[in-house]
Image (spheres, rainbow, N blue to C red):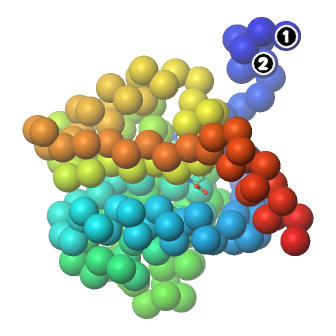
Amino acid sequence: MGRKTLGWLIPEKIPGFRADFYDKLSEKISRMYKELADDITKKMKHGSILDVRTGPGHLPIEITKRSPKVKITGIDLTEKMIEIAKKKAENAGFIGRVYFEVGDGNKLRYEDNTFDLVVSSGSFHHWKNPVRVLNECYRVLKPEKEAWIYDFDKKEIYEVYNETRN
Ligand SMILES: C[S@@+](CC[C@H](N)C(=O)[O-])C[C@H]1O[C@@H](n2cnc3c(N)ncnc32)[C@H](O)[C@@H]1O
């Protein structure tokens, strides 16, 4: 079956009723979010970051722990994911330091030239229209700034799969 046909059958958005399950599953690979946050905060000590398709918000929370002066916003299409992410921020005492909102990565609501860095983790392989999303990331980035899109390679997918089984 072609990618286009599969695209119709498999929605990009994780439905609300699966958000808690995804949250629990992704907690098992918390090491990955910590490593990504280390990588990002080596460069970003202050400024604004947008996390596109943040899911339950693991990455923005880890970034906020490391770089208190960074202002980070995570967006996701699934309301329940954003609810979970906001709860995590509240529990960590990060209200007013990290922001989560429902938003569409294909059509960002932000003005041009808003962010110092755009990040995204573990979702690129799901993007149905990567060019459109990348254009949006480019539009909201300030001039000369970068988007860092992290995804799994084949070997890592097996490692991650094994970690979630322990
Ligand atoms: C595989 S999860 C990755 C979540 C998170 N980045 C992580 O590393 O755990 C992909 C997320 O993208 C969200 N999503 C799918 N389509 C989207 C869109 N057009 N705009 C914003 N979020 C979207 C899904 O709801 C889901 O939470």
Q: Are marks 1 and 2 in contact (CB under 8 Å)?
A: yes
**Which residue bears the numbered disc 1?**
1
For disc 1, the neighbor class at 10 Å (few under 14, some 14 to 19, many from 20) is: few
Can you see residue 162? yes
User: Measured from the top left, where is residue 117 in percent x and y?
Assistant: 27, 51
Q: Hey, what amino acid is under mark 1?
A: Met
Apparent side of residue 5 relative to residue 97 in the rendered image (left or right) = right
**Which residue bears the numbered disc 2?**
6
Of 37 and 17, which appears nearest the observer?
37
Residue at image position (54%, 88%) is: 91
Q: Residue 91 carries which label?
A: none
Apparent side of residue 18 relative to residue 122 in the rendered image (left or right) = right
Of 22 and 147, which appears nearest the observer?
147
- Identify the residue at the far left of this view: 143
Residue at image position (85%, 10%) is: 1
Disc nearer the start of the sequence (1/2): 1
Name the quarter where the C terminus is drawn: bottom right
Quarter of the figure with residue 87: bottom right
